[in-house]
Image (cartoon, grey):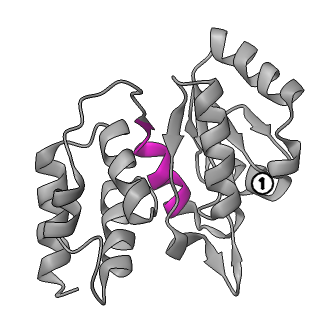
Amino acid sequence: MEKEKIKIKEIIVVEGRDDVTAVKRVVDAQIVQLNGFSGLTVKSIEKLKALSERNDLILLTDPDYAGKKIRAVIEKNIPNIKHAFVSQKDATRNDNIGVENANDEAILDALKNVITAHQNVENRFNISDLIDNGFVSGNNSKERRIMLGDLLKIGYYNAKQLLKALNSFNISREQFEEAVKKINEKNI
């Protein structure tokens, strides 16, 4: 017996055909495929803008460089788009990083923890928050940033990008401190 899929009213935007297949395994939703970074044309962006006027969109890209570039371009053109993130750990199989590699649980988790970016939010966090908590320098700063991104469901960022993400995704001070506490408990 096939398990019941969760119905999602928003339109999910993914990079490629294999991502569509993976997402359709777990949810009942309309899915738009971009065909990777090369599919991000003026015409495709205009199509997404038109869709966003009548529908809410969720962007679910691969947790890699190309996925981040796609996310940045789309967010610039559609500031109210919602964001879903699958961690690099969950999206990696052999040396391939992509949503298509994530298991059903990871995809559902990403779609249950959707975030809307706010372009003009107060800068709740500053660089000293990242330095003081070991996210900028030190032996384990990259690992700490990976864990922070996973715990907050915002993906992985370098230190400069992390500061922008924390503020634009409207992460609360309490969420940040709770995640830091969990990271520190693991002695990383």
Residue 97 horizontal/vertical position (percent) = 67, 72
On the question of residue 111 being in view, the answer is yes
Q: Which residue is rendered at x = 57% and y = 61% of the image?
A: 104
Q: In which quadrant is the N terminus drawn? A: bottom right
Q: 117 above or below 133?
A: above
Identify the main secondary structure in magenta.
Answer: helix
135 and 63: which one is in front?
A: 135
Q: Is residue 71 above or below residue 180?
A: above
Can the viewer see residue 99 in this picture? no
- Under circle 1, the secondary element is helix
In the image, residue 108 lies in the stretch drawn in magenta: yes
Q: Nearer the viewer, residue 28 or 182?
A: 182
Q: What residue appears at the point 38 percent right and 78 percent down from the top-left corner?
A: 142
Amino acid on which disc 1 is placed: Thr
Residue matched to label 1: 21
**Disc 1 crowd, CA 10 A, few/some/many (<14, 14-19, 20+):** few
Magenta region includes residue 143? no
Judge from the rendering whether residue 166 lies leftward or rightward of residue 108; answer left or right. Answer: left
Residue 157, quarter of picture: bottom left
> Which image quadrant is residue 115 in?
top left
Number of labelled discs? Answer: 1
With 10 as the anchor, is 153 left or right in this view? left
Question: Which quadrant holds the C terminus?
Answer: bottom left
Q: Is residue 1 left or right of residue 106?
A: right
Q: Which residues are magenta?
A: 106-115
Asked which quadrant contains residue 148, the reply is bottom left
* Residue 63 higher or lower than 85, as above or below: below
* Percent position of residue 139, x then y: 30, 90
Q: Is residue 161 above or below residue 11?
A: below
Q: Nearer the viewer, residue 93 or 79?
A: 79
User: Residue at left 42%, top 27%?
Assistant: 119
